[in-house]
Image: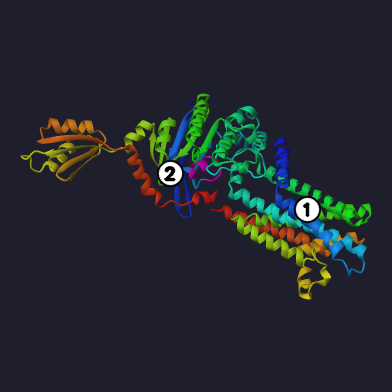
Amino acid sequence: MTSVIELKNISKTFRGKKAVDGVSFTIEKGTVTALLGPNGAGKTTAMSMMLGLLEPSEGSVNLLGGLPGDRDIRDRIGVMLQEVAVMDGLKAGELIDLFRSYYSRPADRDYLIGLSGLSPADLKRGAQKMSGGQKRSLGFALAMAGNPDVLFFDEPTVGLDTGARRRFWNEVRQLAKQGKTVLFSTHYLEEADSEADRILLFDQGKLAADGTPEEIKRALVKRSVSFLPEAAETDCLKRAEGLLAMRSVGKANVTESNGRIVVTAEDTDAVLRILIESGLGIRDIRVDVGRLDAAFEQLTRNREANTLSETQEAI
Amino acid sequence: MKSLLMQSKAEILRILRNPYFVFWSLAMPILFYFIFTRVLNGNMPNLEQWQAHYLMSMAAFSVMGTSVMTFGLRLVQERTQGWSTALRTTPLPGAAYAAAKMFAQMLLNLLCIVVIFVSGWLINGVHLSAAQWLASGLWIVLASLPFLALGGLIGCMKKVDTANGISNVLYMGLAISGGLWMPFEIMPEAVQRIGKWLPSYNYGDGAWSIAAGGTPSATSIVLLLGYLVAFMVLSGYVRKKQEAV
């Protein structure tokens, strides 16, 4: 596999606040990667640096073997930003023609019109009069105007209805099959889960996790084993703690609530085995898997409170 | 090269489709010209001369307006709507974009001048020599550069509303105190004293001189060049400051 994007220890500081903090990763050709995280986690800032719109305060970005701002590199990428930019005074069809003229090997015009999903009548309408969803679809077509190798989508499905959303992702999957590399940001876990091969989880400017959707989900979700101590079993919590500390079961956290002892751990199977084998006097054993969306929501809620639109301002 | 052509074409289309442009740069000047040379011209000592003089005023007023209002506002709009950022992700060089914009603006300024000159000829039969028509038209196009630079400075503003308000005030203020609307001589003396130093007065004065058979004064040329440099340096400075985050 060849790497298409390489970030090495990237940081970006705005007014003394680190929007992106020491992020490194490599993206392989033909993959679909999601930058997942709450608003203000640093996704847009990271993407802006990959696109050469912002200079990193520290670290380096390599895009298609060159610098993101280079003309030859820009000839090979397609971008759809969060704010759908539609030039006023131009018709949708004229915008498509204009964008095609920017690139050295433009995509087929009819193909782009198909992508935009616009009818011949819509193509002749002023682009600024179109609905939000139509503008996004047009934005997608414009991103594809140069027949790019790498595609960047910043929150691509905001404002799209379900039908348009499905069409968009179908198209993205087709593109990935053709060997194009896709990178998109989202704050919807379900979207990252169902559409990406790999998730880069951003939290407070840092890369909190990096892996397949399965791996990310495992890392996010809380699993626990809980039980009630037998009447004869005194000091059950201490004993359980001691047992788990002797054997390596990863991070295990033992608490008590309403007389019930709860062991939170990644590998609940191992915890269960140890507890049973030790002959500890326990009953009413329950294994719980926390809800994924709840876990992600909590991560999101904690952060969104201090979201600032600094990135937007800075670009 | 192809992208430069396409971009220029797009810019021209965009300006022509802008109702403000058609209103402020063509309809208003021609309407004013008609009113002040046909309806309210009772006490003009030399009517014929006044008709040529005021034609120059209106052509200058039109081109100045396009440069200050349309050009500046467009820049702000493009930035706030994320258009400038989107373009920066494409291979279109920033210089090509700027060049296309300037080219489109110049071409449309030329168009405005021709239309206004023709209407002067149609309305009043204004009669100038071929050299005078050419020289005054050329002067109005070239000497509009300081106003384009002023538009660029307005284009640095963050909000469309602010930019709109400020450019309106600047435009009207410059037009009136520079003697583009009414003869400079009937202004209060205080206004005249300040007005002489304004770019709008010197802009108009160059064209008036040509229409009267003379040439633009050296003072006008130097002052306009000074304004051009000042506005460019200023907007360069503001841009730099905005970028340094």
Q: Residues within 10 Å of mark 2 (few under 14, many from 20)?
A: some
Element at badge 2?
Answer: strand
Residue B244 point in image, percent of width and height = 56, 53
Q: Does residue A258 show up?
A: yes
Residue B115 point in image, percent of width and height = 83, 50
Q: Residue furthest left?
A: A232
Given residues A279 and B172, the one toward you in this image is: B172
Residue at screen point 42% across, 37% down: A200
Q: Residues within 10 Å of mark 1 (few under 14, many from 20)?
A: many
Front disc: 2 or 1 = 1
2 and 1 marks on the same chain:
no
Q: Does residue A64 show up?
A: no
- Name the side, left or right, on which A13 lies relative to B12: left
- Vertical position of residue B194 compared to residue A11: above or below: below
- Residue that numbered label 1 is attached to: B26
- Residue that numbered label 2 is attached to: A22
Residue B15 point in image, percent of width and height = 72, 47
- Vertical position of residue A12 compared to residue B238: above or below: above
Which three-letter amino acid code belongs to the residue tagged 2?
Gly
Label 2 to label 1, Cα distance in Å? 56 Å
Question: Residue A177 magenta-drawn?
Answer: no
Element at badge 1?
Answer: helix
Q: Residue furthest top?
A: A178
Question: Residue A48 magenta-drawn?
Answer: yes
Chain of the residue where label 2 is placed in the rendered structure: A
* Magenta region, residue range: A44-55
Which three-letter amino acid code belongs to the residue tagged 1?
Leu
* Residue B31 position by quadrant: bottom right
Residue B177 point in image, percent of width and height = 76, 67
Q: Residue furthest front?
A: B39
